Amino acid sequence: MSRKAAGIALVSSVLAIGGCVPMPRIERQAPAPRFAATEFFNGRTEGRATLKVIMRQAKPVAVHGMGRMERDGTLVLDQIVEEGGKPPKKRQWRIRETTPDHYVGTLSDATGGVTGVTKGDRLVLRFTMKGGFRAKQFLTLRPDGKSAHNVMVVRKLGMNVAVLDEVITREPIVLESVTREAVTGEAISQAKP
């Protein structure tokens, strides 16, 4: 087989396999309640997910988060991600609402900025991950306002290479003082309403 034919066969195989990462159902968008990202992620959140990467078995993922608001209106969300038997990994989001329903920010494991747009109960985030993988997250606030369904689609060369399907639960802040030590390892306390 010539090199050209082998290359075409390889590309065809990869494109055929690209359909092997199924897309979970994204919940229907509704006008209310409005998904206010800085409010939802301010405090403790827990995520339970399944991650399906192309040509690999699906893995369970747990995400433990602690968010806090800075004086300038920036949400700082520290997370610990536990992915299918790998050592836990820390990451940090910094998100700020620039105009109503529009967000910008950073993510520690992204290569550039994060952008977001809210429409009704849906928040859509976009960013590029290390390695040139483009991520798009569809977060849909559930009617109870205490949980959200998150579908993250990761693409490379126009193909879906990974899909995360997650339910995030928000835990209301009950105590006047909340410590971030459990999430970040830092012994920092802050007052919360």
Image (tube, helix red, strand yellow):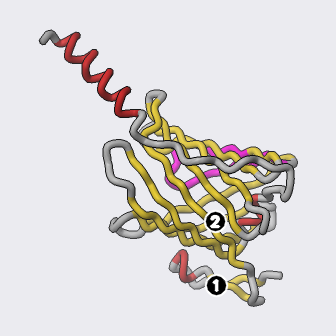
Q: Over which residues does the magenta segment extend?
A: 101-116
Q: Position of residue 31 (x, y in %)?
A: 86, 50
Residue 109 colored in magenta in the image:
yes
The quarter holding residue 35 reads bottom right
Q: Is residue 46 left or right of residue 40?
A: left
Q: What's the CA distance linking mark 2 and mark 1?
A: 13 Å
Q: Give the numbered dot on residue 66.
A: none
* Mark 2 surroundings within 10 Å by alpha-carbon count, few (fewer than 14), some (14 through 19), many (20 or more): many
Label 1: which secondary element:
strand
Q: Is residue 8 above or below residue 31?
A: above
* Mark 1 surroundings within 10 Å by alpha-carbon count, few (fewer than 14), some (14 through 19), many (20 or more): some
Residue at 61%, 80% (x, y): give it: 180
The quarter holding residue 94 reads bottom right
Q: Position of residue 65 (x, y in %)?
A: 59, 70
Quadrant showing the C terminus: bottom right
Q: Is residue 128 above or below residue 48?
A: above
The residue wearing badge 1 is 179
Residue at 78%, 81% (x, y): give it: 192
Which kind of residue does numbered mark 2 sit on?
Answer: Leu
The quarter holding residue 76 reads bottom right
Q: Give the numbered dot on residue 77.
A: 2
